[in-house]
Amino acid sequence: MSTPYYVPETAVPLPPPDADVISTACDYCIVACGYKVYRWPVAGGKVGGPRAAENAFGEDFPVAPLGAWVAPNQHNIVLHNGEPHHVVIIPDKDTEFVNYSGNSSIRGGAIAQKVYNPQTPTRDRLKSPMVRMFGVLMPVTWDFALDIAAEVGNYVLEKHGTNAYGVKTFSYGYMENTYAITKYALRHVRTANFTFHDTPSDVTSTPGFRDAGFDNFGPSYDDWADAETLLMCGTDPYESKTILFTDFIMPAIQNGQKAIFLLPRRTGGVAYAEKNGGLLLDIQPGTDLPVVLAIARVIVENGWEDAEWIRKWVNNKWESSSGFGQGTRNTPWQWRTTWGKFQTKGFEDWKAWLLKQDYARPEVAAEMAQIDVRKIHTAAEWMAKPRADGTRPKTSIMIEKGFYWSNNTGNTQAISSLGIVCGAGGRPGQVIGRAGGHQRGGLRGGGYPRNKSPEKLPGRRRRAMDTDRYLMSGHTRLAHVIGTTWVQAMCGSQSLQAKFDELTTRNPHQVMSFEKQDIVDTLKRRVDSGGMVVWNQDIYLVDPIGARYADIVFPASGWGEDTFTRANGERRLRLYPKFYDAPGDARPDWWIIARLARKMGFDGFDWRNSNDVLEEGARHSRGSRKDFNMVLVAARREGKTLHEKFAEFGTNGIQGPVLMDADGNLVETKRLHDVNRVLPAEGPRGANVFNKKLTHFNSQTGKCNIQKAPWDLFASYWEWLKPREGEIWISSGRINERWQSGYDDRRRPYIVQRWPENWIELHPTVAAARGIESGDYVQVYSDRIPVQKDTIVGVEGSDFDFAALLRNGHIELTRASITAVAIVTPAVKENLGYMDFLHTAQPANALAGRVVDWISGNYNYKMGVGKVRKMGESPYKTQFRSMSFARRDIA
Amino acid sequence: MRHLEPRIRAAINGENGEAEKAGTRRCLMNRRQFLLTGGIATAVVMVGVPGLAAAQTPAAVATYPRKLIARLSDLRVDEPFDFEYPDEGEYAESILVKLGREAGGGIGPDNDVVAFNYTCTHQGGPLQGTYQAADKALGPCPLHLTTFDLTRHGIFISGQAYQSLPQVLLELEGDEIYAVGMFGLIYGRFDNLQG
C-alpha cells in the first residue's frame, strides 16, 4: 500500500499534573483565542497518564468532544532556561470569552509547531546578526552589525535627509515592539518615508468609516451574534477569523440570524449560511458600491430607514462643517467631510442624491455586478423592513479587505451610509465595523510628520508619502524593513522587485571586505551613488528582501520568546508571556531598535525589559480604542508591574478602553459608540480619559456624517481595468489554513501537504475554454498592469483620476507572470480567478495594479486582471500525497 | 462552553434522540458485521473508558491487531460500511468505503477501497452519516464544518482539523479485507492503542 508523504504520529505525551501552565493567546488572526501552554522538563522522562489524577488537565482519556485532546501537532520540544522541555499548547478550555467553548482554528490549533525546534523545519530561524560580505550574509556579533547600521544610518540622515531613511514595518507585532519602532522612526529619525506592512502610505484603511464617525473595531463579538440580520462584505469569517464564525455567527444562524455575504466566491461559511437560509450576493470584483447603494435605495424608496435613529444621530450640513480642523486645511482626512463630492446637508439631501444615481438603481447595479436583482431586494428587506408590529430587525454590517481593498474610498463611503439608514452603530446587535485581519498591536511612539510628505492632492490637501513610489523614484537610500516581505506584499510586485534589484544588487558598490570601516565606506558610496542599502529585522530570512537585498540582517524573536501585550478584534487586551528561549542570539524588535538608537546617539532607549517599554508607552494609549493607561495606574497602586497586572487577567484579558471608577475598580468597554452607556456626570477623574467615541461617534458633533459615494471617482479605473478579450479578473485573499505569507505554515508538513504552492480557483467554463483541469500548472500573466510612476502636485480636482493620470503619461503599463496550480470549481464567479494573496514565490499581487485609491492612498489589492494558460500537469494532479481538488463549499 | 449551541450539545451527548438522528455516537452493529466479527479471533484491546473501575482496565499492547472487517465482493460503490478499529473503545468507529475512484492507500483491483476513523480530528465531532458521494469526502463536521478528502489520505479539504483524518490501513487477502494499522492519532486518545 502507498504511504502518505506526511506520516502523522499515533501517540502524544500528556503533560503531568505538575507541569507549568502558562496562559497566553494565539499569535495569528484578529480573534486571538486564549491558549494554555503546558510545559515540563524532558529530563527524567516523566509524562502524564490517562487518568484524571495523572495529567495536568485533570481529565480521563479518551476525552469528550471539545475536550482537552492533544493532537500530535500540538506538542513540541523547546529550550527553557537552557534545558529541553516538552510543551503542549492547546486552546484554553477554561476561558470565558472569545473561544469560550475551548475551540480553535487550524492555524492556532497547530501553533505549537511555530516554536523553534532544530529537529523541525523551523531550524532555519535566524539566530545571529549577519552582514553581507562578498555577496554572502555572514554571521557577526551584535556590536559589529549595529556599529555599521548606526554609522551608515546617521550618514544617510545627515547627507540625504530624513526622508531618505525609509522604515517599512509591521503594525501589529505587539505593542512593546511597535512603540519602540515608531518612537525611533517618527519621534527621533522623524522620517515621512514610513509605513506599515499592508499599505504604501500611513493612512486610514477605511476612509468612509473615518468620515462617517465609525471606529473600525467598535463592536463586541457578542454584537455580531446578537444581530438578527448580518451583512458580511468582502470576507467569510469562517475562512479567516474562524472562531468569530464558529462560536458566534454559526450559533446565531442556527437561531435564525439572516446572514448575507457580499463576495465573488463561495466558501465554507457561505455554503453553511446558504444551506440555512442565508444569501450570497455573488458580485464580480469592484462592483460592491452600486450593489450597496442599490440596497440602500430599495430601503429608502420603501421608507424602511430607521427614521428615529437618523433624526437623532445624523449631522446636518452645519454640523458636519463644524469644528476645528475641518475644511480644506492640511489635515489627513477632515477635508473629505466638507468636500462637495462627499458632503451632504443630511439624510434628505443624501437620499435625493442617491435617487438621482443611475448605477444605484437595482436593475443597473445587478447588471454591473452580474447578480440576480431579486437578491438586492431580499437583502434590503432583511436589513431594514419593519415587522408587522412595527419593530425593526437588528441589523449589523461587517466589512473586511475583499470589500475595502476593491474600491477603498467608494465602498467604505457607501457602506457607511447603508449602515446609518439601517440604524447600525452603537447598540447591542446593531453595529458596524471591521472583522479584522491581524491582531491590534500598534502603539504610537511618535506622530507622523505629514508636512514632510511630498504627496499633495488638489486643494492644499497633503497626504502621507507613498513609500513605494518614493522608492521607485530613487529617493530612498536606506530601507529599514521590519517583519514584512515588503516586495510581494505590495501591488505590481514584479516591477517593484526590479527596482530593488537595480538599487541594491546591481549597484557597483558591493562589500568586498571584512573590515568594518571598509564595509561602512562601501555602503556610504552606494548610498551617494543613488543606490540603496537595506537593513532587515525578521524571524526568518525572507526572499528577496532579506535573502537578496539586505546588507544587514537582525534576527528577531517573537511569540513566546519575550513577554508582549496585544489586543484582539473586540479590543480585548491580553498578555503573551515568554515561555521558552529564543533561538541563538535572536532578540525582540524593541531591543534591536533600542540598541541601534543608542548607538545613533538618540536618548530615551534605556529600557531593561519589555515591561519597561509598555509602561512608558501606556500614556500614549490614552483616548485610543485600546486605552490601557488606567491598568498601569492600578498596577502602580498595587505595587505590581504592568505586565504582572495584565497577567492577572489571563486569557479573559480586559476590554479596552479601560476606565477606572470612583472606587478604583477597572471598568471595561464592551462596545464603542455605545449610545446607551452612561458615564459619570462629573467627568473623568484622575488620569481617566473619556474619549467621545465611548458614547458617541468620531465627528465634531459626535453624530454621524452621511456622505455620498460617487461611483465616478473609481469608474474610470474599473472600466479600463475590467477584463478584455481572453482576460479574467485576478483577485486574491486569505485561505483558511495559511496565515499571512505562510512564514510558519511553510514549515508545517501538515499544511505544506495541503497547500504546497499557490493555486488559482477557476470556473469550469473558463477552464474548459482553455483546456485546463484541476491539478494543471497554469501561467497567470498580463501585459497591462498599470503602475503609477510620478509624484505630481495635484491642482485640478481630477488630476489624480485614473483617466487623467493615463492621459497625462503618469501610468506605465508593465508585465508580470506567475504560476499556480489550477483548481476548477463552480464556487468562484465565472469571470474570476482567485488565488492565495501572499505566496512569496508565486505572489498574486504581481497581477494587481500599482495605482493607489487617489482619495485615500491605499492600494486596491483585489483589483487585477490577467490571462490564464495551461503549462502542463503538476505532480499533484495524479499523486495522492498532496493537495486536494475537492470543492471547498460542501454544505 | 457556556454558549454551546444546544443542538450541537445534544448531537454530542445523545440527548433527545438527536444522536440517533445525526447518526452519531454508537453505530448499531449490523448483521453482516456481526457475522464477520463473530468467528474471528481478533486481538481485542480494551481501553480505559471513563467511569470504569481501574481494575477493568487491561494492559496496553504494542502492535495493531489484524482484523477482518469485510469482503470486497460485498462492497458497492459509495455505500459506506461501518466497523470498529483498532478496538471497540471510544472513537473506534470507522468507515470502509469503495469510492469508485482511485485513492491514496486504496486497495482492491481499482485501488479505491479505503477506511478512515469517523471522529473529526479537530474537536471530536461525529462524521457518521456525512459521506459525500459526489466529492468522495466526509463532512462537513456538525461542530465546525471541516471536510476531509478520502481520496487523499484523509487530508482536510476545508476547515479546522489539527491533522488528517486517521486512515485505517487495509490489506486484501483473496476477497477478505483486513484492517492492519492506522496513520494518525484518533481524536480523544493520547495513544491509538491505549485510549
Image (tube, rainbow, N blue to C red):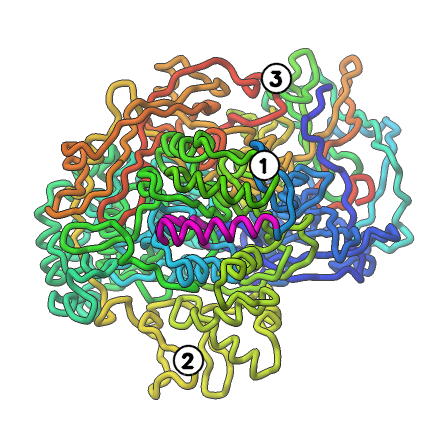
Residue type for callout 1:
Ser
Residue type for callout 3:
Glu
Q: CA distance from mark 3 to mark 2?
A: 67 Å
Q: Between A599 and B110, which is closer to the camera in this rendering?
A: A599
Q: Quadrant of residue B73?
A: top right
Find residue A431 and report its horizontal and vertical position in percent.
34, 61
Q: Which mark is residue B82?
A: none
Find residue A352 and report its horizontal and vertical position in percent.
8, 54
Q: Quadrant of residue A472?
A: top left
Q: Between A248 and B127, which is closer to the camera in this rendering?
A: A248
Q: Are marks 3 and 2 in contact (CB under 8 Å)?
A: no
Q: Between A737 and A430, which is closer to the camera in this rendering?
A: A737
Q: Residues within 10 Å of mark 3 (few under 14, many from 20)?
A: many
Task: Please report, as a chain letter, where disc 2 is located.
Answer: A
Q: CA distance from mark 3 to mark 1?
A: 59 Å
Would you say A288 lies left or right of A329 here? right
Q: Which mark is residue A688?
A: 2
The structure residue drawn at horizontal position 54% and vertical position 67%, both measured from the top left corner, is A613
For mark 3, what is the residue?
A: B102
Q: Which residues are magenta?
A: A144-171
Look at discs 3 and 2 and give the one toward the viewer. 2
Q: Residues within 10 Å of mark 1 (few under 14, many from 20)?
A: few
The structure residue drawn at horizontal position 15% and vertical position 34%, both measured from the top left corner, is A808
Task: Please report, as a chain letter, where disc 1 is located.
Answer: A
Which secondary structure, mark 2? loop
Find residue A13 and report its horizontal and vertical position in percent.
78, 48
Q: Residues within 10 Å of mark 2 (few under 14, many from 20)?
A: some
For mark 1, what is the residue?
A: A513
